[in-house]
Image (cartoon, rainbow, N blue to C red):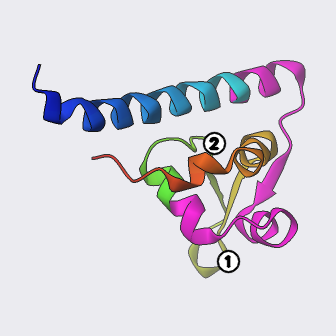
């Protein structure tokens, strides 16, 4: 293995691990009936997570609970509250770059 690729491989593995952990939390919350939803605006106002970070984490595959409610300009995105709260408590996730 090329030693120069180790940082990229490590970053990709960390991103995949974070994505799997988010999926486990989502499944646990839905199984226990605690799957509270939060809008992007509420996540920004109540928890201090910017829309920019939420979009980056969606692009990286870490946030997978996004659900569009409504249509057109009145549409809102909602997310699993516990998933967003976990990201706020672990700010290292907010530094993950989008992986293509």
Judge whether residue 34 is colored magenta: yes
Which marked residue is nearer to the observer: mark 1 or mark 2?
Answer: 2
Query: Magenta segment, principal secondary structure?
Result: helix
Q: Residue furthest front?
A: 3
Taking depth in this image into account, of 93 and 56 the one nearest to the observer is: 93
Judge whether residue 38 is colored magenta: yes
- Magenta stretch bounds: 26-55
N-terminal-most mark, 1 or 2: 2
Q: Residue furthest bottom?
A: 73
* Residue linked to disc 1: 74
Q: Is residue 29 above or below residue 90?
A: above
Q: Residue 17: where, in percent of width, then height?
A: 50, 26
Q: Residue 49: where, in percent of width, then height?
A: 71, 64
Q: CA gap, disc 1 to disc 2?
A: 20 Å
Would you call the spot at circle 2 few (<14 residues within 10 Å), some (14-19), or many (20 or more)? Answer: some
Q: Residue furthest left?
A: 2
Q: In which quadrant is the N terminus drawn?
A: top left
Q: Residue at x 89, y 31 (%)?
A: 34
The image's mark for residue 65 is 2
Taking depth in this image into account, of 9 and 34 the one nearest to the observer is: 9
Q: Residue 76: where, in percent of width, then height?
A: 68, 67
- Is 68 positioned to the left or the right of 56 in the image? right
Q: Residue at x 75, y 70 (%)?
A: 44
**Element type at mark 1:** helix
The image's mark for residue 57 is none
Q: Quadrant of residue 31?
A: top right
Q: Quadrant of residue 27?
A: top right
Q: Residue at x 47, y 50 (%)?
A: 96
- Is 94 positioned to the left or the right of 76 in the image? left
């Amino acid at each position: 293995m090329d030693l120069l690729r180790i940082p990229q491989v490590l970053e990709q593995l960390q991103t995949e691990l974070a994505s799997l952990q988010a999926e486990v939390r989502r499944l646990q919350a839905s199984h226990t009936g605690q799957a509270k939803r939060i809008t992007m605006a509420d996540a920004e106002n109540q928890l201090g997570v910017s829309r920019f970070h939420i979009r980056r984490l969606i692009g990286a595959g870490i946030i997978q609970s996004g659900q569009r409610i409504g249509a057109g300009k009145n549409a809102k995105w909602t997310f699993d509250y516990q998933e967003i709260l976990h990201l706020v408590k672990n700010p290292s996730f907010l530094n993950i770059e989008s992986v293509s």
